Amino acid sequence: MLYVFCQLSTASFVKHLSCNMKVKIKRWHGVATWKWGVDEECCGICRYAFEACCPDCTMPGDGCPPVWGACNHAFHMHCLMKWLESLQSMRQHCPMCRQDWKFRN
């Protein structure tokens, strides 16, 4: 039963309507979204959102997931690998807190 609420000049009333309408779906276009399970919204190196592309990728999720360190900071995988490669002769540390870099298990 479908209830329609109306108000006329001075009186309110509820009008009851019977509805036996059937609906046939001819076409359905499903849409989905995804989001990385990261507390932070953007990479600490490139400052791009984790849902967006890192500077090296062509589309979101293009083989560049977020990676976490033991210090709980998260970065795009490509951004972090570039950062660590640039520190070849030095000790590898987190770009945010400077602790020794260890991947979180």
Image (cartoon, rainbow, N blue to C red):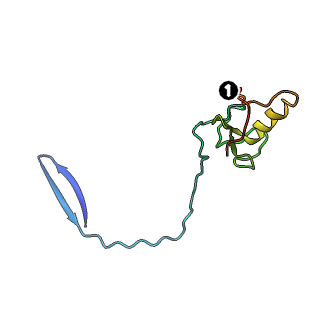
Residue positioned 77% across, 44% down in the render: 57
Instruction: Name the image quarter holding residue 44.
Output: top right
Residue 44, compared with residue 36, is above or below; it is above
Please identify the residue farthest to the left as the structure is shown.
10
Would residue 53 be found to the left or right of residue 33 on screen?
A: right
Instruction: Name the image quarter holding residue 78.
Output: top right
Residue positioned 73% across, 34% down in the render: 101
Identify which residue, 47 or 7, lies in the foreground.
47
Which residue is label 1 attached to?
97
| Number of numbered discs | 1
Image quadrant holding the N terminus, namely: bottom left
Residue positioned 54% across, 68% down in the render: 27
**Residue 99: x, y in percent?**
70, 28
Identify which residue, 24 or 10, lies in the foreground.
24
**Residue 79: x, y in percent?**
76, 36
**Residue 66: x, y in percent?**
68, 43
**Residue 4: x, y in percent?**
24, 58
CA neighbours of label 1 inside 10 A, class few (<14), some (14 to 19), many (20+)? few
Identify which residue, 95 or 58, lies in the foreground.
95
Residue positioned 31% across, 73% down in the render: 20
Q: Tag 1's secondary structure?
A: loop
Residue 100, compared with residue 24, is above or below; it is above
Amino acid on which the number 1 mark rests in the picture: Cys
